[in-house]
Image (cartoon, helix red, strand yellow):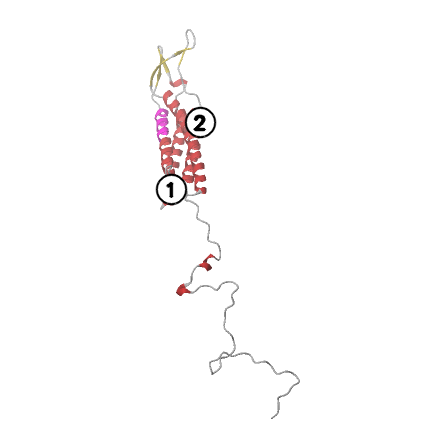
Amino acid sequence: MEAAVTVLLIFVVGMSGVTSAVLGFIAETKKLTPDDIHVSGRECVYPANPAHALAVCAIILLAVSQIVASVAGGCCRPGGGASKSTRRVVGVVVSILSWIMAVIAAVFYWRGAKLNAPGTRDATFAGAFYEKCLVIRGGVFVRAAVLSLVATSLAIKSCVLLRAPAAKDAPAVEGAAADEPRPHGQHPPEAGVAVGLPQWPAQGNGQAPYPQPAAAEGYGQARV
């Protein structure tokens, strides 16, 4: 169940971040150009265009991706040993880097959205009889889209590191089970203690048998 939830959260983070980047690339092709802006007296008229809405949606999706990744990482979840703590430290560092990349991407998105918003703005005088209007430079949305992809990949990495289960304990030492008690009170024999019974047959009088010394060589039995 935990693995399924992790996969689902990573899918949401990835889809939101990638969609944000795609919208950024599309906004780059739809942004206003100097030919689209008209000068009326001392004002610049910016017509409506899709780049403004695309940039705003890209910011929202990027924020959703980062928030879901941070919540999925479980920053408040307790650690689980030295290996778990080390993994969490790396995961937190990666998450911070992801947020830094996301903030920079959002700044580029916001800059592009502001300069592509429809409306009128005061013209800037570049000379006595020359007026100019501000226009977004090429590549702003592209940089934002690339940074969105980098932030999303780092967010997924941090989510995996922070949600990874703790390492299992090392297996028991071989032979340790020999020290455990056996059923019915049986215990394994201690090392160096000989066990067993004598192999001489029992006699009828109930006395334990003893080995008889062999007759001496060279001597016969005594005669009566």
Is residue 161 magenta-colored?
Answer: no
> Which residue in the rendered view is the most extreme toward the front?
224
Q: Majority secondary structure of the magenta segment?
A: helix
Which class describes the residues within 10 Å of circle 1: few (<14), some (14-19), or many (20+)?
A: some
**How far from the left and from the top, in percent, is residue 29?**
41, 26
Residue position for label 2: 143
Which class describes the residues within 10 Å of circle 2: few (<14), some (14-19), or many (20+)?
A: some
Which structural element holds mark 2?
Answer: helix
Label 2 and label 1: CA atoms lie apart by: 29 Å
Q: Where is 2 relative to 92, above or below?
A: below
**How far from the left and from the top, in percent, is residue 128?**
42, 6
Asked if one can make out residue 15 in the rendered structure from this viewpoint, the answer is no
Residue closest to the eye, 86 or 59: 86
Residue closest to the eye, 170 or 154: 170
Q: Nearer the viewer, mark 2 or mark 1?
A: 1
State the mark number for residue 70: none
State the mark number for residue 6: 1
> Which residue in the rendered view is the most extreme toward the top?
128
Residue at 43% over, 38% down: 88
Image-quadrant location for residue 115: top left
Q: Where is 184 relative to 115, above or below?
A: below
Residue closest to the eye, 209 or 108: 209
**How far from the left and from the top, in percent, is residue 195?**
50, 69
> Which residue in the rendered view is the most extreme toward the right?
218
Q: Amino acid at mark 1?
A: Thr
Residue at 38% over, 19% down: 36
Q: Where is 141 relative to 128, above or below?
A: below
Query: Over which residues does the magenta segment extend?
Result: 50-60
Which mark is first along the chain, 1 or 2? 1
Residue closest to the eye, 110 or 157: 157
Which structural element holds mark 1?
Answer: helix
Image-quadrant location for residue 46: top left
